Each structure stands twice: as structure tokens, then as C-alpha cells.
Image (cartoon, rainbow, N blue to C red):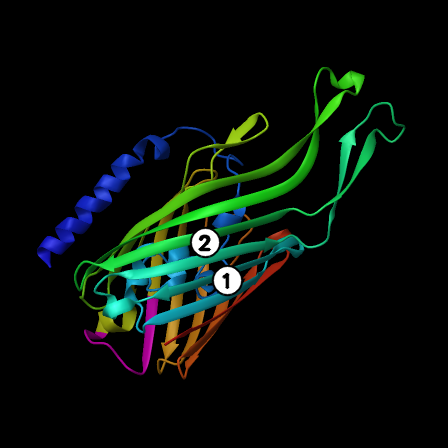
């Protein structure tokens, strides 16, 4: 176990150093990334905890938080589907499936899919100083976004796991008119705002084996810059470290089959907005019912999130409710099962 912990620390340190040039940038971070749908969590269990899922065994859904945790699925196949009624009438859906051949001796393979439905069509306009209204209608358009990924995770031993997740993402924001000479002459050209790119997630997971304490680390949405016409930007890179454990087991020195209170805490460094600290509470009764709450510090819109879960007959259903300030409320539902 000593060597395992040493290897975990060494790998974590290497990942931190490799990203130091990105994470050490001294600047005000506001709206500097695109493809923001990749940073939205649709999983109800994680959302109820405020997103504190990096150090939790999330099965195939772990590919969206920490790919290394996918190595801990129980059956041969595990599937999850999440529906997220996001702000402004946006529906964000996510699906994942994990395959565990030969009991994990060769590792665990996973596939993910995310899709965004932006609801009703959007009406486009362009500036036109010759028109009394000051603009010209360009017609309706429907933005779309999707991502599909392939992941792999492996338990190197009973304590330490590693994992990675490669994904292809596509986003179509319709067409726009760009001035070609001087906007006072009303001379423009039409350009397509469709982009595609690839991104990588990777992480490590260390189960200490001591009173249910576990550590997790992940880097999500690592990619090169992409560009719309003349404006370039990067994807919503996030670097997260977290720890979780059962408070009852810590106090009593032994686990209980009746109830658990798992506390998850993590800190995340984002490319496009200030760092956040998240605390999640998960009370589990009889390994069947779960009551959850989470809080995100340094976030102006998120409030305390809540959630419920039930695990029966191999089927797990989770629900999360997140107040989102002036933007309304967000509700998520996740269903998962394993064979």
C-alpha cells in the first residue's frame, strides 16, 4: 500500500506540473471558453452533491467526472441515462455504458454520448443602419451541440486506478453575417458557425482502504484552441482534486450496513471562472435509500442542491433539484442498471 500511495502522489504531481503553465496564468477569468455544454453535469447523483463526484465511484457516469472511477463497476455491463432540464428551456441529456470483460483484468471500456436540445428556434438579426429598425432579420436557426466519447479505466491494484476519456464534440450555432470592408457600407459575407474538435479527460483514483477514505484527481476538457472566424478560444478546462469518506465509519471505526453518511469535498480550478470549493453530503439508509445535499462556494447563481436516490433490484434511480438564482431551477433524473 505504501508503494501504491507513492505512485499515486507521483502521478498526481506530474499532472499538476504538466498543467502549471495553464493553471498559473494571472488574469481575470471571465467567459474565455466555448463548448460550455461539456462542463454541464446531467448526472442527478453528482448534481445533488453540488458536483462533488471526483472521489466517488460513479460507475460508467464516472467518465464525465473522473474516468478512473469507472474501473469499479460491479457487473459485466453498466448503463446510465440522465435527463437534465437546464436553464432557459435547454435540455441536456447524457448516456454512458461500461463494459467489464474478464472481471476487469483487461480494464473497463466505456462509451459516452451527450446531446443538447436548445428548445424553440432562435431568431437571427444583423445590424443594418439603413433600415429604420436598425437591424435586418436573417431568419430562424436552431443551434445544436453533441459529444461522443470512448473511455478506458484500469485498476492497477486493489487501491489505485487510472483512466482516460477521449471525446469528439460538435457545435452548430447557425450562420452569421460578418462585415467585409466597412460596416457603414452594409457590405457583409455569410459565415457558418459550426465547429468540431476533440478533447481529453483523465484522472486517478486512490481508495486508501482505511475507513472508506478515497482520493480522486481529474483533468477535464483538455484540448487545443478552436476558432469561430477570427475569435479563438479553448474548451472549459477544469482541474479537480477531491476526497470523500463515511463519517459514521470514521467515528465508530467500522462500517455499518444500516446507514452511512458520506462526505465529499473537492476543489476545482477552472480556466474561465474563479476556483470553487464543493461539499456534498450523502446519507444512505439500508443501502437502498439516499438523501443528498451539496453546496458550491464562490458561485453567484448556484444555491444548495438537494436530491434523492433509490437502489432496488439492480436498478438505481436518482433525482436532483438545484435552485439557479434568477435563472430558475434545474431538475435532473438519472437511471442506471448493471448486469
Q: In which quarter of the image is the N terminus?
A: bottom left
Tell me if residue 22 comes above or below residue 47 in the rendering. above
Tell me if residue 112 comes above or below residue 137 in the rendering. below
Residue at label 1? 305
The disc placed on residue 227 is none
235 in magenta: no
Instruction: Tell whether label 2 touches label 1 (CB within 8 Å).
Output: yes
Residue beneath the point at 18% across and 48% down: 9
Q: Where is residue 278 in the image (x, y as percent from the top left)?
A: 40, 54
Q: Is residue 119 left or right of residue 16?
A: right
* Mark 1 or mark 2: whose residue is earlier in sequence: 2
Observer-nearest residue: 202 or 86? 202
Observer-nearest residue: 204 or 246? 204
- Looking at the image, the residue that sits furthest to the left is 2
Q: In this view, does 237 lie to the left or right of 321?
A: left
Q: Check disc 1 and report its element: helix, strand or loop.
A: strand
The disc placed on residue 296 is 2
Residue 107, by quadrant, is: bottom left
Observer-nearest residue: 240 or 178? 178
Tell me if residue 319 comes above or below residue 199 in the rendering. below
Residue beneath the point at 39% across and 66% down: 281
Residue interval drawn in magenta: 252-262
Q: Position of residue 48 (x, y in %)?
A: 47, 64
Amino acid at each position: 500500500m505504501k508503494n501504491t500511495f507513492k505512485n499515486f502522489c507521483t502521478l498526481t504531481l506530474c499532472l499538476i506540473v504538466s498543467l502549471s503553465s495553464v493553471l498559473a496564468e494571472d488574469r481575470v477569468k471571465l467567459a474565455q471558453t466555448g463548448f460550455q455544454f461539456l462542463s454541464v453535469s446531467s448526472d442527478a447523483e453528482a448534481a445533488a452533491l453540488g458536483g462533488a463526484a471526483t472521489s466517488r465511484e460513479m460507475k460508467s457516469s464516472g467518465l464525465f467526472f473522473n474516468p478512473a472511477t469507472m474501473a469499479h463497476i460491479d457487473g459485466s455491463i453498466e448503463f446510465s441515462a440522465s435527463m437534465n432540464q437546464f436553464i432557459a428551456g435547454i435540455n441536456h441529456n447524457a448516456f454512458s455504458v461500461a463494459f467489464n470483460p474478464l472481471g476487469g483484468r483487461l480494464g473497463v471500456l466505456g462509451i459516452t454520448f451527450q446531446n443538447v436540445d436548445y428548445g424553440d428556434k432562435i431568431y437571427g438579426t444583423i445590424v443594418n443602419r439603413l433600415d429604420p429598425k436598425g437591424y435586418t432579420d436573417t431568419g430562424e436557426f436552431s443551434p445544436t451541440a453533441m459529444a461522443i466519447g470512448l473511455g478506458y479505466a484500469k485498476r492497477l491494484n486493489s487501491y489505485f486506478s487510472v483512466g482516460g476519456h477521449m471525446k469528439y464534440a460538435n457545435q452548430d450555432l447557425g450562420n452569421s453575417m460578418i462585415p467585409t470592408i466597412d460596416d457603414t457600407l452594409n457590405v457583409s459575407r455569410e459565415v457558418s458557425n459550426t465547429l468540431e474538435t476533440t478533447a481529453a479527460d483523465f484522472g486517478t483514483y486512490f481508495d486508501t482502504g482505511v475507513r472508506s477514505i478515497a482520493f480522486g484527481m481529474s483533468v477535464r476538457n483538455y484540448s487545443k484552441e478552436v476558432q469561430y472566424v477570427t475569435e479563438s478560444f479553448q474548451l472549459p478546462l477544469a482541474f479537480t482534486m477531491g476526497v470523500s469518506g463515511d463519517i459514521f465509519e470514521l467515528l465508530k471505526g467500522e462500517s455499518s450496513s444500516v446507514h452511512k453518511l458520506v462526505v465529499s469535498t473537492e476543489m476545482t480550478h477552472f480556466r474561465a471562472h474563479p476556483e470553487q470549493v464543493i461539499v456534498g453530503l450523502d446519507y444512505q439508509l439500508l443501502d437502498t435509500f439516499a438523501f443528498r445535499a451539496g453546496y458550491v462556494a464562490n458561485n453567484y447563481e448556484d444555491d444548495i442542491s438537494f436530491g434523492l436516490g433509490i437502489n432496488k433490484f439492480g436498478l438505481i434511480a436518482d433525482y436532483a433539484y438545484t435552485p439557479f438564482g434568477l435563472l430558475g431551477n434545474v431538475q435532473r433524473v438519472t437511471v442506471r442498471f448493471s448486469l
